Image: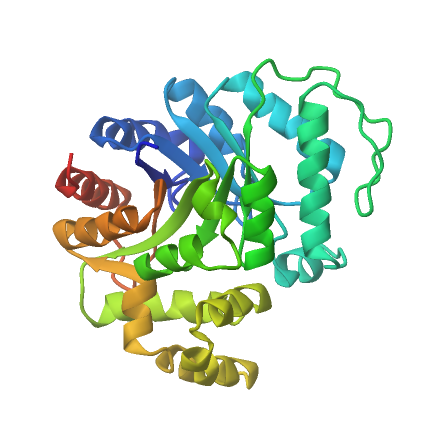
Amino acid sequence: MSRRLGVTLPFDDVALADHRPLLRQLVAAGYTEAWTGEVAALDGYTPLALFAGWEPDLGLSCAVSSVFTRGPGVLAMTAAAMAEVAPGRVRFGIGSGSDVIVSSWNGVPFERPYQKVADTLRFLREVLAGERATDRETVHAEGFKLLRPPAVPPQLIVAALGPRMQELAAAEADGVCLNFLSANDVATVRTRAQVPRIVDAPLEISGRIFVVPGDGAAVETAARRHIAGYLTVPVYAQFQNWLGRGPELADMQAAWAAGDRRAATRAVPQHVVRDLVVSGSPQECADRVEAYFDAGLDAATLYVLPSAEPLSPEQRVRFLVDLAAALPS
């Protein structure tokens, strides 16, 4: 598979309508995909619909929609609409989300996440092909049928933070989306005995790579805050445990649980910061991104983290352009 370079948009400090010239520069520099998220800023699909019209060759993906916060019928209609807007360019990402997003912020019980993702994946595969839905353990949409099934269904991507979900993706999805992992972790995911089908199946492996331009104390603080804020969430903590990083994060998680956010941030080991967040010059960051590709990543999606010494949107884009130029052709 060809290696693809993506970028996470929109920037939080730029109005959605003002992204067009920024996106144009990124596409000209070699970024072939735009990925969004769906947490607490904008929804994942309105930006992609705009981007689809602005850049007719751009790959599009939301990483990812929670199968709990969007009902099955709404997910299917959203996937069909995106496929119609950008035929052949859409990777439709689904996942469980986290207990914080699902329960705390949306009031939905976070129960049986694996089965919910599996049932939703099978439901989407069924109805996007124009078939009428059948009832499943956790997805009750019997009789649902899309009135406008897409001529070219989107690729279905599963966010997988553990071996069982990775096995599901390898067996039934078109790709897997990974998060909070080092280049060495990519190799681990591909070769672990628990997930052999990821090695054998023609499965696209995408990963979000967190980037902070520059170096120094402000950069390291930004990286530490991001790690502490996420890797104390149970689903992410479990993934790190599976990767073997659990003991190294125990002090951070204990401080966070005690309510001491500053201590939790300080407790992140420096080598973990180095493993999970890319920083430095454009060339240094390009070298780190290249290591992910060498380890087996098919698509690397860069997410520029905010720093205590923030860059303007134009500076961020310039950094990303320079990073892309520093990658081997």
Left or right of 91? Residue 81 is right
In the displayed structure, would residue 110 be above or below residue 63? below
Q: Is residue 74 above or below residue 170?
A: above
Q: Quadrant of residue 65?
A: top right
Whether residue 48 can be seen here:
yes
Q: Is residue 329 above or below residue 101?
A: above
What colour-coding does the image apply? rainbow
- Nearer the observer, 22 or 236: 236
Residue appearing at x 37%, y 32% in the figure: 33
Residue 247 picture location, percent across and down:
45, 81
| Residue 192 placement (x, y as % from top left) | 45, 59
Q: Is residue 100 left or right of residue 61?
A: right
- Residue at 28% in and 26% down: 24
**Residue 217 left/right relative to 145:** left
Residue 118 image offset from top left, x and y in percent: 68, 45
Q: Position of residue 202 (x, y in %)?
A: 46, 35
Q: Residue at x 21, y 31 (%)?
A: 29
Q: Nearer the viewer, residue 294 or 58?
A: 294
What is the quadrant of residue 170 in the picture? top right
